[in-house]
Image (tube, rainbow, N blue to C red):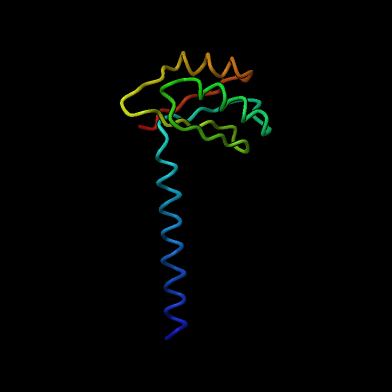
Amino acid sequence: MKTITLILSIFLSSLNFLSAEISEKNNFDITIHVKGLVCDFCARSVEKTFSKTEVVERIKVDLDKGLIELQLTEGSTLSDKKIQKLIKASGYALESIERNK
């Protein structure tokens, strides 16, 4: 009986973890694919540039995938032209922009 309870607890915990991971991924409004984003210094540079923009609430940089994910403040927008300008100011090349919501 203890074994079944333990297995069930582990299973339910893993479902909760997966749910949180999916929820976090869908939380971002914009996904930006960038060329040349390879080191932690690169990530800090991009974060600093985008954090100066008032409409950006949260930034996540994925160096392995070359992605920048942005969560905007409620009801705000950020144009593709502005994103392109910010990426260029950070010293990187824009590949594509995806709107998630």
Q: Which quadrant would residue 95 be assigned to in this image?
A: top right
Quarter of image, res 45: top right
**In which quarter of the view is residue 18 placed?**
bottom left
Horizontal and vertical percent position of residue 36: 66, 26
Taking the spot 50% from the left edge, 32% from the top edge, the residue there is 59
Which quarter shows the N terminus? bottom left
The residue at the far left in this view is 75
Which quarter of the rendering shows the C terminus? top left
* For residue 32, above or below residue 83: below
Q: What x and y, as percent, mark residue 87? A: 56, 19
Residue that lies at the very extreme toward the bottom in this rendered image: 1
Residue drawn at x 56%, y 28% is 47
Q: Residue at x 44, y 26 (%)?
A: 56
Q: Is residue 82 left or right of residue 95?
A: left
In screen coordinates, is 87 left or right of 13? right
The structure residue drawn at horizontal position 46% and vertical position 62%, both measured from the top left corner, is 14
Looking at the image, residue 36 sits to the left or right of residue 47; the answer is right
